Amino acid sequence: MTAEMTLGLSVAAAHVLAEAGTFEGHRPTAVVGRDPRASGEFLEAAVVAGLASAGVDVLRVGVLPTPAVAYLTGALGADLGVMLSASHNAMPDNGIKFFARGGHKLADELEDRIESVYEEHRTGAPWDRPTGAGVGRVRDYEEGLDRYVAHLVGALPNRLDGLKIVLDEAHGAAAKVSPEAFTRAGAEVVTIGADPDGLNINDGCGSTHLGRLKAAVVEHGAALGIAHDGDADRCLAVDHTGAEVDGDQILAVLALAMRERSALRSDTVVATVMSNLGFKLAMEREGIRLVQTAVGDRYVLEEMKEKDYALGGEQSGHVIVLDHATTGDGTLTGLLLAARVARTGRTLRDLASVMERLPQVLVNVPDVDKSRVKTSAELATAVTEAERELGETGRVLLRPSGTEPLVRVMVEAADIDQARSVASRLADAVKSALG
């Protein structure tokens, strides 16, 4: 990501949305936010310059989580939202994400169109730019944090009084938002990883490094711990003993809580094919229907919107509660999880025991022809044999990587040794059939 690229993409986005009729009949407005990465400072300036030069008024909200930018885009009636973040990646990385009116992700065809228009103009075609009073105006929207926090607290079914909670903010975008929201909701809050300096985001902390949170929860005698990633669109948790509670377990707890208060529409939860088999078995036992999608929170969200489901997510901790958010929201997820602990008086460990995580082994097989995963007869035979061996208490998934020349082999079984053995044999079969 360079300043030039970011500026160009922003101008392209403005032109593409104008062509699509998004700005018709009014002066367009965009909400722009970022995480605290050092590079976000100059990339934000480039985005703001690009949008304003294309005639878009800009509300600059500063350092806020990705879901906050999505929420404010909808709440403020903006035509476009822009978030600068590389999520859980290391500090040197950065990225840009566009939201459509209402705070929803842009349609694939619009994203593709923005890229192609950017490329056209990068190679020399001049932009048609407004001048004088036609250029966009820029102002800081300092009320953004308070408005978003009020929205989060207002989504809770009950307060968190009496709970001590440790929050690991990953030195990221939620460093101010999350502690403020949990405190307003009544919790006693202990924070770690809440001192971003532009260089320390995700550095040994947050949802990708749970060691510090586990130790802090036990040290402070807290009821639970919540960990976010750099842009706070995901949430993982730790129970009072320091044990990890992953996205599948969080989904299970929230599904039962929402059904209890008649908020789980169609008694259905949406997850991806990578969800642990234990989650599927638990939902079946509890009478909750599970709909599974391809891997990626965008596919979960598409299914939820199309069928009007209320809850969905991924094992990684991306959880979408569609009545209150248009994307994964780690702070909201953590608040709802804590609210369930407070309401029931049960420990998070007890609540999460609704599902038993079956041993899961993942093997990456590189340098193979991933395009033939679904058409290889030899591989199909190997998978059938593996599924027969595992029976009802196991599962096999072969998936070509979306970004690398490799095939991912995932095996679940009641016994870890069996899972490893089957995964190893399938990895050999992939090399033989596709190598």
Image (cartoon, helix red, strand yellow):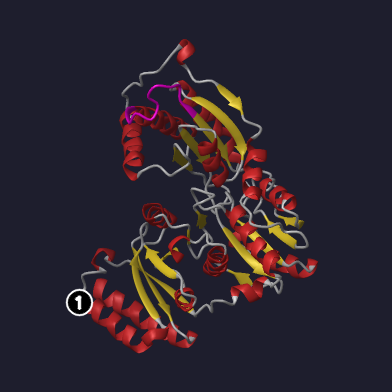
* Along the line of sight, the residue nearer the viewer: 369 or 169: 169
Which residue is outermost to the top?
132
The x and y percentages for residue 197 are: 69, 44
Residue 233 magenta: no
Residue 230 in view of the camera = yes
Q: Amino acid at mark 1?
A: Ala
Q: Quadrant of the C terminus?
A: bottom left
Q: Secondary structure at mark 1?
A: helix
The x and y percentages for residue 325 are: 52, 49
Q: Residues within 10 Å of mark 1 (few under 14, many from 20)?
A: few
The image shows residue 19, relative to residue 373, as above or below, that is above
Which residue is outermost to the front?
262
Q: Majority secondary structure of the magenta segment?
A: loop
Q: Residue at x 36, y 27 (%)?
A: 18
Horizontal side of 8 relative to 46 (left or right) equals left
Residue 45, picture quadrant:
top right
* Along the line of sight, the residue nearer the viewer: 192 or 371: 192
- Which residue in the protein does label 1 denote? 377
* Along the line of sight, the residue nearer the viewer: 168 or 99: 99
Residue 21 magenta: yes
Q: Residue at x 24, y 69 (%)?
A: 374
The x and y percentages for residue 199 are: 64, 46
Residue 269, picture quadrant:
bottom left
Horizontal side of 43 relative to 299 (left or right) equals right
Q: Residue at x 24, y 75 (%)?
A: 433
Residue 206 in view of the camera = no
Horizontal side of 15 relative to 261 (left or right) equals left
Q: Which residues are magenta?
A: 19-29
The image shows residue 323, relative to residue 349, as above or below, that is above
The image shows residue 25, relative to residue 174, as above or below, that is above
